[in-house]
Amino acid sequence: MKIGYAERGSGESLTEIWESIEMAAFFSPSRRGFLGAAMTGGLLASAGPLLGAGIFPVVETANGRLRGMMAGGIAKFVGIRYGAPTSGANRFMPPQPVEKWSGVRDALQYSDTAPQVPGDRRHDYADLIMFDNQPSGPGEDNLALNLWSPALANTAKKPVIVVLHGGGFYGGSGNAIGMDGEAMARFSDSVVISVTHRLGALGFLHLAEFGGERFASSGTAGMQDIVAALEWVRDNAAMFGGDPGRVLVYGQSGGGAKTSTLMAMPSGKGLFHRAGVMSGSALRMMPEEIANANAARLLKALNIGAGDVKALQAVPWTTLLETQAGLEAAARAQGEAPSSFAPVVDGTVLPRHPFAPDAPEVSKDVPLIVSTALDERSYRMGNFDMTEAQLLAFAQERAGERAKEVVDLYRDESPEETPFLLAARMDSDIWFRKGAFAQAELKARQGGAPVWSYLWTWPSPAYGGRYGAVHGIDVAPSLHSVRGALNGPSAESVAMADRIAGSWAAFAATGNPENEYVPDWPAYDSTSRATMIFSQDPHVVNDPRSRFREIWAEIGATRPSAAQAE
């Protein structure tokens, strides 16, 4: 549409005409241009497969029609329920199905997040890893997923990337800003999905002794939620342009632990075809005897007697969460490990530990990526001005009489590094890499689908770089985002995002992470232990950090206690 001065009349100046055009654009739905023209086949019609389809596309699912929203050429559907609300009689039960509906239901607002204890923003790491920084409030209507797609045609058959959020089994959600999948959907040409599920006692309170057979699997309810979400993907992904036969499930930290656990669950078999564990290799889950003790402690604090399940289901979730938090605080105050809630090896839903004593047979045919970051534990340590003497004392707590030998080994590798980061690196080797190494070894020895390994060494520029390659540094770039506090929008962080997101995109599409942004990446085996080093100079090293692994094995160092880990 062309607007000329003569057509508008001689009473208006050119400035007035331009201002009227600007105001029309300002009040248009997009405020970025003449979207009205685009919606009638104008400016944006040829910019992508979805842009001419309207602002609010509608998709038919197995339960009914959903209305989403366009965002930069990507279709966005949020708050899609894959399970019914979990309050009342549904609390502690397996996820219940969503009732079918008529008409069109909006998928424009996020669901509740799972109830969780708020974070403490008095510390730097609160800005780095803050699980409750989410766009929606807590509640028990949280069995939902969020989906981003570059093409809604049911013939598109794009790879599907399902991201499980971090936060252990106690915090976070798929609604968090860091789980936004729009950039990754665009970069990878894949359907990206984030999942929200039950956490803490509401997701993993084991009530087999308390509630009888009906509640025998309550200690795995949060993991059953994830299986239900994957069943939704199986049944509906094609309608959103996805290929239900190419589903990647991956996650960092707690998301990696959930992925590890999922690989040992018979109910998950066939629902995902590639898996990724970033800084969250979980070899074992909670034994029933510990889960029973945790449940008894919580029920006593709530003053609920044995067998009174209805009373437990009627307790407001705020009271239950506050009681859970109080027990944890009391344990810490007494120098004890806090009661925790995690998936329980119940013999049925989770019949065995995820990777102990070996890799699970049920996922033998699923290829896997296992990873860590160099300085994982730095986000849990606050002594940035640590001296060399304090570093030696730190090492003595873990290595005893061999402390100086350990410090010398770390110092020899990184002569200019701060004592603080060397200390963090020690605990990262003991805490994270020990488990990751074991998981990769077990998967490789199984002789089924291959496993790949990577080590992220590029340090975060946040806070002057004092955190190094901290826990969580690879989360945002894995979704091709540089907006996270750990990375920032620089040429270096964009290059790192290309490398890691390109690897996950290739893995989702083909089952192999090799891609144009990194050099050849051979699979891991127990002989060469090839590992991709994600840095500004990405390269493969065979068995990196073997000297450190071997010395800690000789010393017999174990992970820090649960109390220290908190």
Image (spheres, rainbow, N blue to C red):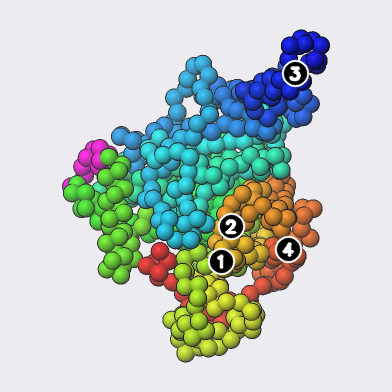
Q: Residues within 10 Å of mark 1 (few under 14, many from 20)?
A: many
Which quadrant: the N terminus?
A: top right
The residues tagged by marks 3 and 2 sit, at their Cα atoms, a distance apart of 50 Å
Which residue is found at the position 71% from the left and 61% from the top? 523
Residue assigned mark 2: 486
Q: Position of residue 451 (x, y in %)?
A: 66, 59
Q: Residues within 10 Å of mark 4 (few under 14, many from 20)?
A: few
Marker disc for residue 536: 4
Q: Are marks 1 and 2 in contact (CB under 8 Å)?
A: yes
Q: Position of residue 163 (x, y in %)?
A: 57, 46
Q: Position of residue 299 (x, y in %)?
A: 23, 50
Q: In screen coordinates, is 298 left or right of 105? A: left
Foreground tag (1 vs 3): 3
Q: Amino acid at mark 2?
A: Leu
Residue assigned mark 1: 467
Task: Look at the image and give the residue range highlighted in magenta.
Answer: 305-315
The residues tagged by marks 1 and 2 sit, at their Cα atoms, a distance apart of 9 Å
Residue assigned mark 3: 13
Foreground tag (3 vs 4): 3
- Is residue 427 visible in this depiction of the protein? no
Tag 1's secondary structure? loop
Tell me which label, 1 or 3, sits earlier in the chain: 3
Q: Are marks 3 and 2 in contact (CB under 8 Å)?
A: no
Q: Amino acid at mark 3?
A: Ser
Which residue is found at the position 81% from the left and 15% from the top? 4
The residues tagged by marks 4 and 1 sit, at their Cα atoms, a distance apart of 17 Å
The residues tagged by marks 1 and 3 sit, at their Cα atoms, a distance apart of 58 Å
Foreground tag (4 vs 1): 1
Tell me which label, 4 or 1, sits earlier in the chain: 1
Tell me which label, 3 or 4, sits earlier in the chain: 3
